Image (tube, coloured by chain):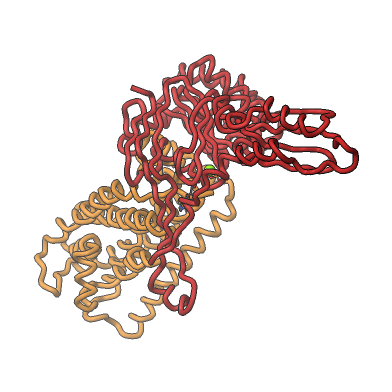
Chain colours: A orange, B red
Amino acid sequence: MTGTRLYWRLVGISIRSQMQYKVSFILQSLGQMIVTGGEFLGIWALFDRFGTLQEWAFHEIAVLYGLANVAFSVADALTNGFDSAGYLIRKGEFDRVMVRPRSTVLLLLGYEFTVRRIGRFLQGAAILSYGLVVSSESGAPLGLVGTAATLLWAIVGAVALFVGIRIIQACVSFKTVQSIEVMNVFTYGGVYASGYPFTIYVRWFRMLFTYGVPLAAVTYYPALLLMGRLDPGGAVRWIGWVSPIAGVAFLMVSLVIWRFALRWYSSTGT
Amino acid sequence: MALIEVDSICKRYVRRARTTGRGAALRGLFVREKVVTDALSDVSFTIEAGELVGYIGPNGAGKSTTVKLLAGILTPDSGTCRINGLVPWEERREHVARIGVVFGQRTQLWWDLPVIESFDLLADIYRLDRTHYETTRDRLIDRLSIGPFLEQPVRQLSLGQRMRADLAASLLHRPRILFLDEPTIGLDAPGKLAIRDFVRTINAEEGVTVILTTHDMDDIEALSSRLMIINSGRIVADGAPSILTDELARNREVVVDVTPAHGGEARPPEGTLAAALERSRTRWSLEGGRFRFDVDPTVLSVPELIRLVGEQYTMRDISIETAPIEEVVRRIYARTDGGANAPTASS
Ligand SMILES: Nc1ncnc2c1ncn2[C@@H]1O[C@H](COP(=O)(O)OP(=O)(O)OP(=O)(O)O)[C@@H](O)[C@H]1O
Ligand SMILES: [Mg+2]
């Protein structure tokens, strides 16, 4: 069986077992929607009070916020196996992954497809659509096909980036089995930060999320194209069509690190 | 070339623990002390195809660590290992496709899936040919009497059932080598017998090489043609179980009931007997007219001992025993316990 087919098979099994507890699934999805929805409500309240944020309009924030949340919810659903790596190691379940003649990455991706992330996904998608519609009404130049293609490419880059962060997070858990909440700065913190234009942040923060963890490359720059704006920081207009590649590159690097990190794995005593 | 060649393997675990002592709480926020455990120190052995090796040692000796290294789960700090010519931790995927592993403590199956579906999924994971797989599977189901609980999710199985399902799962891809880490742990007597029977059969009839760790001496006596004993991360004995008994448990326990020559309580040995006991360093006790000698026959032969006792006492009864395997193993553990892999702390 090819890797892809095995992946779908594992995903199927994981979804079926999540559906055994339907009520809990529905409640958790709704819960996610309410939490992330509340977050956006806060942003809205801010704009309602102050009108703009350093020249940025509400619908533009909606594009940024929606893009980051759609991408993160997808990555989050895909990578629960990596997110749970610390737990799997402590429970000794990672041994099971190691004794199978398959890629450890494939098996961890197949560990669970977390359906309840659909809460954040739907909420993010709704806000993104709102932002895009208002942007096009106020004269964004891309047209339907251009918008769709740019959006898709940005999402691919952003999902790749978030998956990469999760993989590196799992690598760290080989070294310290203790939970490593620090890494959430880059995932949850990253999504939250991408909800605002990067120009509002201080320099070191911008640098970290542009060159260290290239979050700006997969959200901010493509979002500028989608809303038909130029970067106040002076970046060339077309950068947003190229920059999502940084997310893919980040993922590649994280996979290389993963291969090395497997040597750090020290299993668990019983 | 032997099937399994292990050469000078060392494995050290480094764990970061909270510090203790003065100011520890505050320091613990920033520095974690390192706790180092040398789980394996310079371990070497070879195993030929078709062997059935019992691997024993006290808790924490390094058995599971060895199995995890051989199974490609862990990477050692130094040393080499080739199995089928492959280095387990370097060519992990090729290697694990050719071995079977069972950890008695923990299932390798999917907790929520019915047994049969776990098997089917494994067939996909191992890329097994459908018809071959079905033949193998059905034979294993039959041999291990798994039929009655095939449709039950693994989490609902009893320990004995789960162990049999795990054993079957480890053999679906027809590996030529099987690693069993405590496969009889927690099982009742019939459960243990079923596992032993099965392991003996696949070894004898199909020539599968088996390495089995256990704390159950009955497993060893029933199964192994070769015993490896590890203590504190070092192999301390390796050979046929009988050789071990001969060599390491050569001591005989000689019990002699005596009547003192002149009535009353038997007095302690004197003269030539006392000198012989002294010279051969034989431990002895005398209570209520019953002698117990723990004698090493290569230093003081049993007939000689009896003769000397006969010179001084009137003997009523004699019995001579060799130590049972548990006792042998206990002695080896005690004798070789250097505490070498006790955790040491450093910062
Ligand atoms: N993941 C780990 N991290 C740190 N130390 C470990 C780890 N696994 C094992 N150890 C330590 O290494 C030593 C060897 O452990 P191992 O599990 O190999 O022993 P064992 O012979 O299988 O013991 P048992 O009979 O109790 O199963 C022990 O001192 C143990 O505490
Ligand atoms: Mg063990």
**Residue B118 appears in the figure:** no
Residue A195 % position (x, y): 31, 69
Name the image quarter holding the N terminus of chain B: top left
- For the view shown, which residue lies furthest in the top direction? B205
The number of numbered discs placed on residues in the rendered structure image is 0
Residue A40 % position (x, y): 39, 71
- For the view shown, which residue lies furthest in the front direction? B271
Work out whether B124 lies above or below A56: above
- For the view shown, which residue lies furthest in the bottom direction? A50
**Residue B124 appears in the figure:** yes
Q: Residue at x 54, y 19 (%)?
A: B202
Residue B197 % position (x, y): 62, 22
Residue B172 % position (x, y): 49, 25
The image quarter in which residue B213 lies: top right
Name the image quarter holding the C terminus of chain B: bottom left
Q: Nearer the viewer, residue A138 or B208?
A: B208
- For the view shown, which residue lies furthest in the right direction? B263
Work out whether A223 lies above or below B92: below
The image quarter in which residue A100 lies: top left
Q: Residue at x 50, y 39 (%)?
A: B230
Q: On the rendered structure, is B221 left or right of A73?
A: right
Q: Nearer the viewer, residue B73 or A203?
A: B73
Q: Nearer the viewer, residue B114 or B347?
A: B347
Work out whether B30 lies above or below B145: below
